[in-house]
Amino acid sequence: MTSLKLSIAHQVPGRVRLKVPSAKGNPELLRQISDAFGVIPGIEQITVNPTTGSVVLHYDTDQHDEFHGHFHAHVARAHDYRPPVTEIDELARKIEEEAEFLAQNSEAARAFVDFCKRVDSEIKLATGNMIDLKILLAVGIIGFTVIEIGAAAATPVWVTLTIFALNHFIAMHPHAHQPAGAPVVTQA
């Protein structure tokens, strides 16, 4: 994985605008960035814009020197940022590597890999990066299993699968709870 690329687009006392190209259309990444910068002393408000991939930090000008000392340390850490890798991400990476290997020697495999990437990209774009092809495939498998086994099974498998899927969906999409006194994060 590559480091997070961000740049200071504009800066005046009390306000800094950061551009994060990889955060365009990715509200989850913007939330993680705002959480990371929200701990800097003097931050009063953070505004994120998923359309442009920008983060605006509003800070108390009375704490200008302290803010900038912490701010530059956070920017340096952000350049070494690596998103957390889950088991599902690791499995998907292995499948992608295998598919790419097979696609090098087969036009049919190349067409299938390109099709899957295009469908995944379209799903992410349509859902604002909340759902991807991995989630839809899991839901499809659960649906197929429920239909094939039916609701009349001795132990309702569909209930177990639904709880399992919901638990993993929640684990993959954690919601941040802001502590009292934390800076306000808004979307532009």
Image (cartoon, rainbow, N blue to C red):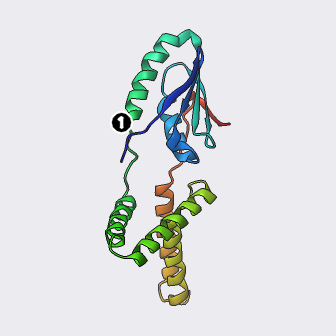
**Relative to residue 64, is residue 35 depicted above or below?**
below
**Residue carrying label 1:** 80
Indicate the position of residue 4 as horizontal and vertical percent values. Answer: 42, 39
Q: Nearer the viewer, residue 25 or 117?
A: 117
Describe residue 141's horizontal placement relative to residue 12 as left or right: left
Report the amino acid beneath label 1.
Answer: Asp
**Relative to residue 111, is residue 62 depicted above or below?**
above
Counting other residues with Cα less than 10 Å from the Cα at mark 1, is it few (<14), some (14-19), or many (20 or more)? few
* Quadrant the C terminus occupies: top right
Indicate the position of residue 96 as horizontal and vertical percent values. Answer: 37, 65
Q: Residue at x 37, y 52 (%)?
A: 85
Q: Nearer the viewer, residue 127 or 107?
A: 107
Q: Residue at x 57, y 44 (%)?
A: 24
Indicate the position of residue 28 as horizontal and vertical percent values. Answer: 53, 46
**Relative to residue 152, is residue 69 depicted above or below?**
above
In the rendered image, the residue lying farthest to the right is 188
Indicate the position of residue 71 as horizontal and vertical percent values. Answer: 46, 22
Q: Residue at x 48, y 89 (%)?
A: 154
Specify the quadrant of the image occupied by residue 54. Answer: top right
Could you tell me if residue 179 is visible in this image? yes
Q: Nearer the viewer, residue 95 or 186?
A: 95
Q: How many marks?
A: 1
Specify the quadrant of the image occupied by residue 94. Answer: bottom left
Could you tell me if residue 150 is visible in this image? no
Q: Secondary structure at mark 1?
A: loop
**Relative to residue 49, is residue 25 depicted above or below?**
below
Q: Residue at x 46, y 74 (%)?
A: 112
